[in-house]
Image (cartoon, rainbow, N blue to C red):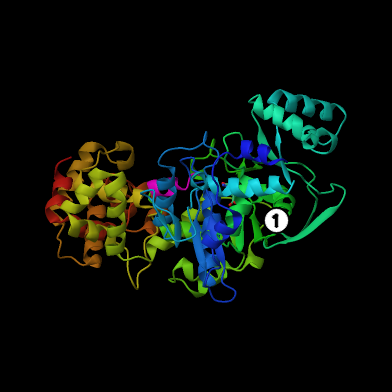
Amino acid sequence: MTPEIIDLLFPNVLPTPEEIEARYPARQLPEGAVVSRLAPSPTGYLHIGNFYQGFLAERLAHQNKGVFFLRVEDTDQKRRVDGAVQVVLKALAHYHVLPDEGAQEDGSDKGSYGPYTQSLRKDIYQAYAKELVKKGLAYPCFCTSEDLDLMRKVQEKQGLRTGYYGKYAKCRDLSDEEVLANLKAGKPWILRFKSNGDYDKRLVFEDLLKGKLSLPENNIDHVIIKGDGLPTYHFAHVVDDHLMKTTHVVRGEEWVPSVPLHLQLFALMGWTPPKYAHHALLQKLDNGKRRKISKRYDPEANIEYFAEHGYPQTAVLDYLQNLMNANFEEWRKTNPLAPTFDFPVNFSKISNTAGALFDFVKLHSICREVIANMTAEEVYNNTLTWAEKFNVPLADLMKANPDKVKAILNIERGIGTKSRKDLMKWEDVENEVSYFFTKPALDSENLKPLSMDEVRTLASEYANMYSVADDKDAWFGKIKELAVKFGFADNMKEYKANPDNYKGSVADVARILRVLMTGRTQSPDLFAIMQVMGVGEVKKRLTEI
Ligand code: GLU
């Protein structure tokens, strides 16, 4: 194309490719170091699948003496949401998946391979695009959306593959005069690259997760620069990952069909492509059918969901590693308390044929284990950190009664005893703590077979017997005594042998007392609950019914 056309296409002063290259020198890293990245589009939301890809990329880099960076892919300005970068950074920080470089919360950059926000790199993409035009490898396309719709319809009618290729690539062969006239007439344009691919030939490449893949070459003249002057994802990916020296791209498998195009663009630019690891999307079972986890239907598609509900970070990371890595469970058994980050990720062990199925039951069982392995102090601290953000009344209550709450959390916890497994997330703590502070409402159903009056008599009798100095045996001895006095068998076997002789067994009396103390029929160890509650409160609950 003539210099006049090139000036009309790129009126701004742009750096030369040599100047740009000089700003991005080779990274000084040990042999074999991995440079990887998370490259979210700032839409105000981090999908759990993208989070996992970031986690994988981070592990890959940090297990291999490399660099993990965050790049903000905001070339689609219409989808851009203010504060979205903060959302991503917050989620990453919450799980300690920490980028070494990239866009920061305050809009600044950390690292010397930036800017790490694509909209700030416009000149760079334009400079390379200009170079392609100069070499005759890219051209402006003036087709309107109506032209393109018509083209698609014609192709569909003839049963052809749709797209801007071959004889349908109408602007590919415009003469310089036609281009000039269009530009002078102010016709809107976008820039396409001239594909030299042959759709009938196959391109074979090795994906780190999917193994050898064979796809048709790309013969479509894809758009590289859009109407607003910003690049498409494809061109930005190639330019940025080249300049930022990315060695490994971990991304969603929806990009697999674009690999021939990306490899073609790398070759066209004369650059070495990175290695690709395309990760299958997470799925879930919906009425027996598999479908991908979607923002629209599943609140858990948003990684923030887990922080909001107080899932322990370790449990979420463990769960994701467990879901994706066939060898994680085994590793966890041998290293029960090691940080999830110590698990050596091995691509060949990542299950990736179909999307892994997200399963709350498994996640919850991991959560229970993780919390069961914590001290009361750790549970207290984690819950408080969570509550200060998401449940302020609970945080206030905890801060006003730290020793008591720790004592509550210490019930059935600890070395030697089988630790309680009722807590799955910090959100659940309120329910386990609240009844110690607020006398629960009573449901007469749970006090059967006694009437309310009978319960009052039994409870006041027990109030006279209860002593905080009793050990567990003496405590239970008194409950048995109480049971016999009120017509219950003092053991289950006796009751089962002669049910007509009794109102029930000692277990029913214990249940009635449990309900009076906690408002519920199931709770951790009642003896311990009463000890923590204190004699004053216990007697109050027995006498003020
Ligand atoms: N912005 C792209 C996405 O969100 C990133 C893909 C990539 O990692 O290259 O899908």
Q: Quadrant of the C terminus?
A: top left
- The image position of residue 154, as x and y in percent, is 83, 26
Disc 1 beta carbon < 8 A from ligand 1? no
Where on the picture, by quarter, is residue 469? bottom left
**Front-lying residue, 136 or 47:** 136
Residue at 48%, 59% (x, y): give it.
Answer: 317
Principal secondary structure, stretch drawn in magenta: helix
**Which stretch appears magenta?**
302-308
- The image position of residue 299, as x and y in percent, is 48, 40
Q: What residue would you read off at disc 1?
A: 353
Above-or-below relation of 536 to 519: below
Task: Tell whether 507 sits left or right of 236.
Answer: left
Q: Quadrant of the N terminus?
A: top right
Mark 1 is surrounded, within 10 Å at the Cα level, by few (under 14), some (14 to 19) or many (20 or more) other residues, namely few
Above-or-below relation of 148 to 520: above
Q: Is residue 53 magenta?
A: no
**Front-lying residue, 502 or 236:** 236
